[in-house]
């Protein structure tokens, strides 16, 4: 285990390590997420990357009173020159199991790259933002306003991720508000105002996250219909974990804690991130099952069309978007998003 890991966490992680070895074997694993940073709540789970070729996707488990979020990857993914997200996680994470020292060797390579790995991750995130901006504009042109609003949500979160990468910081949905307050880049050019607008923070109440989570049953019914439980794909494994009782238990606890601590914006960001991730994974499964190409600009409209056929009485997915969906409001958001994205494209990390 990394010597740099705080001793107060070390004993708990040793317990988690024994649990993981018992469940999945003696594989290289690393602790990532807020438990490795100064932003952490008592009810936060333990995010672990387990390197194995036998499993893929995401699987949450309960160990005692704690949630252990397990993300499966293969070591070969660390050789991918475009595996920026995994490499930045490795650079900030704490190794908890390394039976053949292979993970330590990879971490040394990543550490030697220094800030370059964050610069590469930043450039990759900006490309993602440019794609989302294109989708938002195309959806608007097709009068698919719900989908356009969805892509604005994605842009809001990815702008925050990009601004944190400029400061060599990894983003946590649970603690994004605190990270924004401490990151000086957010204060430049009213970027926090833009992020808040794209994420719909001005519409948040203490119960907003419950409105977003009300779409859980819709996601579950659609995922079941499209065979998420039997498909052997990373997307299927991931969404099954995302919608599981264990995962929702953790997210509910986090949101309740945030509201109790008078931080409803944090609860909103947690639930919104769950919603956008679940939407993207579900759409991949739908397109795979129907053997059609993904047309991402109309992503939410396409899913809504199928929902009305499969589960007409279930909550509409557009119910998760708090801000008013109308052409004038969306046009303004798209114009603001374009300015922010192209500023980030010109910025040098």
Image: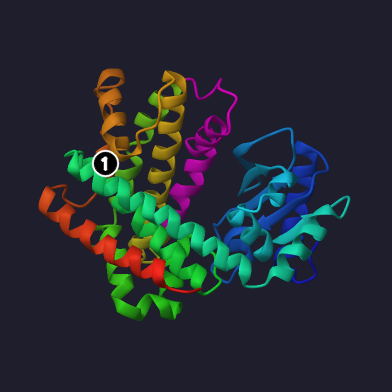
Is most of the magenta stretch helix, strand or loop?
helix
Compared across the picture, whether 330 is left or right of 339 comes to left
Q: Residue furthest right?
A: 100
Q: Is residue 268 visible?
A: no
Residue 24 rendering spot, x and y as whole percentages: 76, 37
Look at the image and say whether residue 244 sits in the magenta stretch: yes
Q: Which of 61 and 70 is in front in this view?
A: 70
For the N terminus, which image quadrant? bottom right
Residue 347 rendering spot, x and y as whole percentages: 43, 73
Look at the image and say whether residue 30 sits in the magenta stretch: no
Q: What stretch is highlighted in magenta?
A: 227-256
The residue shown at (35%, 79%) is: 187
Q: Name the residue under label 1.
A: 147
Q: Which of 258 and 195 is in front in this view?
A: 195
**What is the total number of numbered labels drawn onto the structure image?**
1
The residue shown at (29%, 30%) is: 302
Compared across the picture, whether 60 is left or right of 15 comes to left
Helix, strand or loop status at disc 1? helix
Question: Which quarter of the figure has residue 286?
Answer: top left
Compared across the picture, whether 332 is left or right of 208 comes to left
Residue 314 rendering spot, x and y as whole percentages: 28, 27
């Amino acid at each position: 285990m990394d010597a740099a890991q705080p001793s107060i966490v070390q004993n708990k992680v040793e317990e988690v390590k024994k649990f993981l070895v018992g469940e999945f074997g003696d594989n290289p694993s690393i602790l990532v997420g807020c438990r490795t940073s100064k932003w952490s709540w008592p009810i936060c789970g333990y995010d672990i990357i387990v390197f194995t070729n036998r499993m893929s996707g995401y699987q949450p488990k309960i160990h005692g009173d704690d949630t252990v979020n397990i993300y499966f990857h293969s070591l070969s993914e660390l050789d991918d020159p475009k595996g920026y997200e995994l490499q930045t996680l490795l650079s900030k994470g704490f190794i908890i199991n390394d039976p053949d020292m292979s993970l330590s060797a990879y971490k040394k390579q990543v550490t030697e790259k220094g800030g370059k790995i964050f610069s590469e991750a930043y450039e990759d995130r900006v490309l993602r933002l440019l794609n989302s901006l294109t989708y938002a504009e195309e959806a608007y042109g097709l009068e698919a306003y719900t989908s356009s609003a969805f892509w604005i949500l994605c842009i809001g979160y990815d702008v925050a991720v990009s601004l944190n990468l400029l400061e060599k910081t990894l983003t946590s949905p649970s603690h994004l508000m605190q990270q924004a307050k401490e990151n000086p880049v957010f204060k430049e050019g009213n970027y926090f105002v833009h992020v808040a607008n794209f994420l719909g923070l001005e519409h948040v109440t203490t119960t907003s996250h419950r409105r977003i989570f009300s779409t859980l049953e819709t996601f579950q019914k659609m995922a079941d219909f499209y065979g998420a439980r039997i498909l052997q794909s990373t997307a299927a494994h991931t969404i099954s974990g995302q919608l599981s009782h264990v995962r929702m238990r953790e997210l509910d606890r986090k949101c309740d804690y945030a509201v109790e601590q008078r931080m409803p914006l944090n609860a909103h960001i947690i639930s919104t991130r769950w919603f956008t991730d679940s939407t993207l994974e579900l759409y991949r499964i739908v397109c795979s099952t129907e053997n059609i190409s993904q047309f991402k600009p109309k992503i939410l409209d396409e899913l809504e069309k199928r929902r009305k056929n499969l589960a007409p009485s279930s909550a509409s997915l557009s119910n998760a978007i708090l801000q008013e969906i109308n052409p004038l409001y969306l046009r303004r958001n798209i114009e603001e998003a374009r300015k922010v994205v192209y500023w980030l494209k010109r910025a040098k990390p």
